[in-house]
Image (spheres, rainbow, N blue to C red):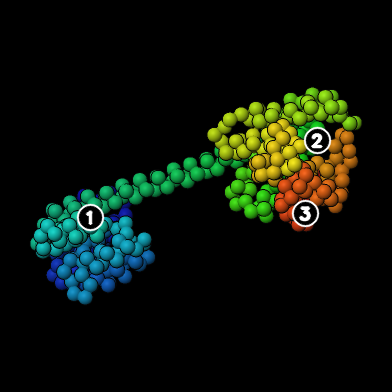
Amino acid sequence: MLDSVNAPRKTILIVDDLSENLDVLEGILSPYYRVQVAISGRLAIRVALSSTPPDLILLDVMMPEMDGYAVCRFLKNDVRTWEIPILFVTAKSEEENEIRGFEMGAADYLIKPVSSAIVLARVKTHLALHDQRKLLADQVAVRTAQLLVQNMELAETRQEVIRQLGRAAEYRDNETGMHVIRMSRYVHLLAIHAGLSEPEAELLMLAAPMHDLGKIGIPDHILLKPGNLTVQEFSVIQTHCEMGYRIIGTQNCNILSLGGLVALTHHEKWNGSGYPAKLSGEAIPVMGRLTAIGDVFDALTSVRPYKKAWSVDDALNVIAQGAGEQFDPRLVKVFIGLKSEVVEIMQQYQDDVV
């Protein structure tokens, strides 16, 4: 027996313009397979494209109007039928004809007059090979889908760990830690409208929460002091930029690498009076310049141990006054024009905003 008793019978399509050739092949195959016949190339294509396509095609080469090569070429160029094995049946055994068929995608050749044993053996072999290829392709597809899900879960987990790492520092001086959520969205909004690509803006949004990671190393009596800081105390506060950069370290991960850059540069000022390196103008990385605006705006509109929350208009006025001094003037202009979008973000994450 060629097929298991319980397995559904495979379907073989025989294509030939001579009825006597169809009868011979059908007689050989019908005891073991479900057989379909087509007396022309065009009819063969119609059957192959039907809702119940054949599992394998025996295709005569020499046919009027549309020969076997044309039929093979059509079926192999159509995504719906390209996987169906095609065995040419021909009286021509010249080597160049066989090469032409194999180049078109034919699986094998059968030479007329056909032998029952050879027909059954070739058909069985190519059906088995086709099933194995299909099984392997299905397994690859399933495994690829599983890996994609796992990679997405790993990426989401990594992003959440990084986000919570950034919030850990905020819990030191911010009751809810929502500062990093809001400011990262302000920065994302500003980055998009300032001309960064969506992937760049998305990466910055994920990295920005780490900007104040170095606060973990600042003593509470300085970080939580309600009054003005002394010169010495402020110098200690300034160390959080380099401290955050060192905590993150040198990483191959794009998010962490950018997080370190943002931590190091978000307190640099356009006029060169910032810290820690006193960079100025475009020498300050744009990711640091973007983060600086979002960070200061949210700090102004949030409650802190040493101040009440400012109104949106008052905070925007401070940002505007800092253009060309503390902030990149071009970015300030863009941010001021985004007032309505900024307010929407505030309303969505307003736990500690007045």
In this picture, residue 125 sits left or right of residue 213: left
Real-space CA distance between mark 2 and mark 3, rounded to the nearest whole angstrom: 25 Å
Q: For this view, does 9 lie left or right of residue 262?
A: left
Q: Secondary structure at mark 1?
A: loop
Of the residues tagged 2 and 1, which is closer to the observer?
2
- Of circles 2 and 3, the one toward us is 3
- Residue 90 in percent (x, y) is at 14, 63
Secondary structure at numbered mark 3:
helix
Secondary element under disc 2, as helix, strand or loop, is loop
Mark sitting on residue 80: none
- Nearer-N-terminus badge (2/3): 2
Q: Which mark is residue 107?
A: 1
Which residue corresponds to mark 3?
A: 336
In the image, residue 281 sits, relative to residue 35, either above or below, namely above
Q: Nearer the viewer, residue 292 or 278?
A: 278
Whether label 2 touches label 1, CB < 8 Å: no
- In space, the residues marked 1 and 3 are separated at their CA atoms by 67 Å
Q: Earlier in the sequence, mark 1 or mark 3?
A: 1
Closer to the chain start, of discs 2 and 1, is 1
Report which residue position mark 2 lands on: 174
Q: Amino acid at mark 2?
A: Asn
Task: Estimate the x, y position of residue 157 in percent, counting from the top left.
Answer: 60, 38
Q: Disc 2 and disc 1: Cα gap in Å?
A: 70 Å
Amino acid at pointer 1: Ala
Residue at left 16%, top 69%? 62
Identified at 56% across, 36% down, the residue is 253
Crowd around label 3: few <14 · some 14–19 · many ≥20 (10 Å): some
Q: Label 3 near label 2: C-beta < 8 Å?
A: no
